[in-house]
């Protein structure tokens, strides 16, 4: 069983309506980039906890999560209302296997995210491992509105550090936005626009694809990747894509 520890909110950033990052100070155990902790609040006498990927790298503090408010959800409305100084519960140990440990050698690492699924990749990209293991890293962030594109400064820092080994593509589905590809990630994969944009091809011989976000994107992307010969990675049967479904 995972123990709960108290975590103190020490920073908060609102990126757009209903879209937040919270920073915490908490005595949690070492974790691997790509893992999640659970955050909980006492609501009507019951401890309600949900998993959140850590956005900070394992070597960095504060701990940070990136989330959107689900108005009908029990946890995210009160979570959004927290301010520095407030306390939450957090699991003392992070969990999950959506890490580079479950990624086989490849030339190009594709990181596809919808919405707050971006956060998990920022933790991974802030470690040395992807840059030691892959020639190129291509990060794709799919959102509905351009206002939901977040962490621009962090992405610029990574781009500045790794130059043309790193590509970032924003995909905005519900409006035209300068500098972003128009449409959903899956449609941009089907049309070939995404690969044309970065000058790389997703194929099983050279690529590993990580998928993080909503179930519709993951389901459709899996079908597209499998039609191209990629198979899901399993512990005893290595493959070329891995997934983390948030909802
Ligand atoms: C391994 C894992 C890691 C996760 N990491 C993150 C993370 O880093 N950031 C993050 O924002 N969420 C993350 N989630 C989702 C998160 O745990 C919660 O489900 C979410 O924040 C909503 O919590 P809630 O209690 O308000 O509503 P819930 O009771 O969890 O969900 C209520 C309803 O909203 C849907 N829903 C859940 N999340 C979303 C969403 N983001 N947008 C729209 N609808 C949603 C659910 O499918 C459900 O139908 C993760 C989930 C898993 C399984």
Image (cartoon, grey):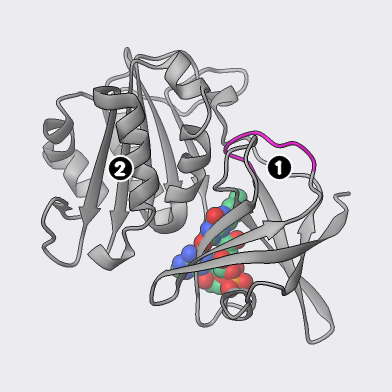
Q: At 31% across and 34% down in the image, what residue appears?
A: 159
Residue 113: image x %, image y %? 38, 47
Instruction: Give the answer, above or below, for where 83 lies relative to 111.
Output: below
**Residue 125 visible in the picture:** yes
**Residue 234 in sight from this viewpoint:** no
Q: Main secondary structure of the magenta part?
A: loop
The answer to which of 231 and 97 lies nearer the viewer is 97
Disc number placed over residue 140 in the picture, else none: 2
Lower position in the chain sequence, tag 1 or tag 2: 1
Task: Decide which of 6, 72 is in the foreground and name it.
Answer: 6
- Report which residue position mark 1 lands on: 95
For the point 16% across and 51% down, the residue is 180
Question: Which of the 4 quarters of the picture holds residue 155?
Answer: top left
Task: Answer above or below: position of 110 versus 149.
Answer: above
Looking at the image, residue 58 sits to the left or right of residue 146; the answer is right
Give the magenta part as a residue range. Answer: 29-35
Callout count: 2
| Badge 1 element | loop
Residue 191 spot, x, y in % from top left: 12, 41
In the image, residue 37 lies at what x, y percent?
69, 51
Q: Is 34 in the magenta?
A: yes
Where is ligand 1, by quadrant? bottom right
């Amino acid at each position: 069983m995972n123990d709960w520890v108290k975590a103190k909110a020490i920073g908060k950033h609102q990126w757009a309506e209903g879209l937040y990052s919270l920073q915490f100070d908490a005595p949690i155990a070492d974790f691997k980039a790509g893992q999640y902790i659970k955050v909980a609040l006492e609501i009507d006498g019951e401890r309600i906890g949900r998993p959140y990927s850590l956005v900070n790298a394992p070597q960095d503090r504060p701990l940070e999560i990136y989330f959107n408010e689900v108005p009908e959800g029990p946890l995210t409305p009160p979570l959004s209302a927290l301010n520095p100084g407030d306390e939450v519960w957090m699991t003392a140990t992070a969990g999950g296997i959506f890490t580079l440990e479950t990624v086989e050698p490849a030339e190009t690492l594709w990181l596809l995210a919808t919405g707050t699924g971006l956060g998990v990749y920022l933790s991974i990209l802030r470690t040395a491992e992807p840059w030691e293991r892959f020639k190129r890293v291509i990060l794709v962030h799919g959102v509905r509105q351009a206002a939901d594109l977040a962490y621009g400064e962090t992405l610029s820092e990574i781009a500045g550090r790794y130059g043309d080994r790193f590509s970032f593509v924003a995909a905005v589905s519900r409006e035209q936005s300068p500098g972003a590809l128009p449409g959903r990630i899956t449609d941009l994969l089907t049309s070939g626009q995404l690969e044309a944009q970065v000058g790389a091809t997703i194929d099983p011989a050279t690529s590993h694809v990580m998928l993080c976000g909503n179930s519709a994107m993951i389901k459709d992307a899996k079908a597209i990747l499998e039609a191209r010969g990629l198979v899901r990675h399993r512990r005893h049967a290595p493959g070329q894509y891995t997934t983390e479904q948030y909802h």
